[in-house]
Image (cartoon, coloured by chain):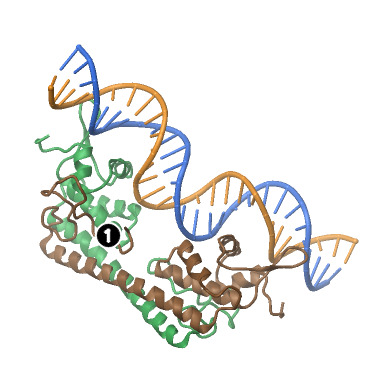
Chain colours: A green, B brown, C blue, D orange
Amino acid sequence: MTDTSLTIGELARRSGVAPSALRYYERLGLIRAVRTGGNQRRYQRAELRRVAFIRISQQVGVSLEELREALASLPESRTPTKADWAALSARWRGRLNDQIAFLERLRDDLTGCIGCGCLSLQRCRLYNPDDELSADGAGPRLLLPPGAS
Amino acid sequence: MTDTSLTIGELARRSGVAPSALRYYERLGLIRAVRTGGNQRRYQRAELRRVAFIRISQQVGVSLEELREALASLPESRTPTKADWAALSARWRGRLNDQIAFLERLRDDLTGCIGCGCLSLQRCRLYNPDDELSADGAGPRLLLPPGAS
DNA sequence: GTGCAAGCTGAAGCGGACTTCAGCTCAAGG
DNA sequence: CCTTGAGCTGAAGTCCGCTTCAGCTTGCAC
């Protein structure tokens, strides 16, 4: 255990992620473990970094599925390098910027609405589905969060 | 139907919210409807504004339960005024600012990490659970999203 | 060698925000 | 009238990210 590999409990403690979550991540293919003779998981130290990346990505708003795809794009067998992590991180930056921009717009519109108090479906920028323009098709609808398509 | 009241389908079309969602909101006590002789819902036009407020609030990240409490704090029987909406909106602004601040910090840290490429559990600001300081109690853990604790 | 914490598995549960379904009733136009 | 689309209900299903549970095995310390 002062060995290179970590038990699931050790990884859990050091990463702050519950063992059940780690098993779950493994089922989804986000992390990997080798097994001992007695079928217990042993993690390489590099997995610690993977787990870190997973948790950070979640805070950015990335789903585990999307994360799986991103991680799968890493060169198969090698332990991810600094450069690998940096590339992935850079990918999330764009999302973060979109999200921030979305929230700022929402805040500013909301601030405007505090002034006007309207929440009017006819006029308010915050909420503008097709009210007078009620053609059947898709019209302007809700202000969508980034990525809501 | 050119009457003051709206059927559920009309409210759905004009608000961009599915009838099933409107019924769900009603069960949670977020909106109200009167019933016709034949037990169908009829909505006052003011409900349109309520629904707008609900959807906007959700984008701010407010849960329906919290929203229910907020709406319950409105003077019982009167149709909410401009001022009522403004007060509620102002309440969300703080949350929005927290969220924005959180994401900005995350982005900036991430940007820093792109430079250093570390994701090191020992050093990285992004992810700093108790690794060397592994006392049993609560230590610095994940950067938590606002309101996560 | 024995006791006990830690690990294993698959299945089920949870919470939030809805949607879908089955089976039935209502309302409005022709 | 009659048809057809809109509405009604309660129950169950869905998706996501886990946690919990039951029942069993491992592994380490004494």
Q: Dividing the picture into quarters, in which one does residue B101 lie?
A: bottom left
Residue at the far bottom in the pictured view = A116
**Quadrant of the frame with the C terminus of chain A:** bottom left
Image spot of residue A100 (x, y percent): 31, 72
Q: Vertically, is A45 above or below C27?
A: above
Image spot of residue D12 (x, y percent): 58, 44
| Left or right of residue A95: residue A84 | left
Camera sees residue A138 = no
Image spot of residue B17 (x, y percent): 55, 68
For the point 25% across and 28% down, the residue is: A39
Looking at the picture, tell me which residue is in the foreground, A57 or D19. D19
For the point 59% across and 74% down, the residue is: B47
Residue type marked 1:
Leu
Classify mark 1: helix, strand or loop. Answer: loop
Residue labelled with disc 1 = B144
| Left or right of residue D27: residue D14 | right
| Left or right of residue B43: residue A145 | left
Image spot of residue B86 (x, y percent): 46, 81
Q: Dividing the picture into quarters, in which one does residue A131 lie?
A: bottom right
Categorize mark 1 by other alpha carbons within 10 Å: few (<14), some (14-19), many (20+): few
Q: Vertically, is B88 above or below D22?
A: below
**Quadrant of the frame with the N terminus of chain A:** top left
Camera sees residue A22 = yes
For the point 27% across and 60% down, the residue is: B144
Q: How many marks?
A: 1
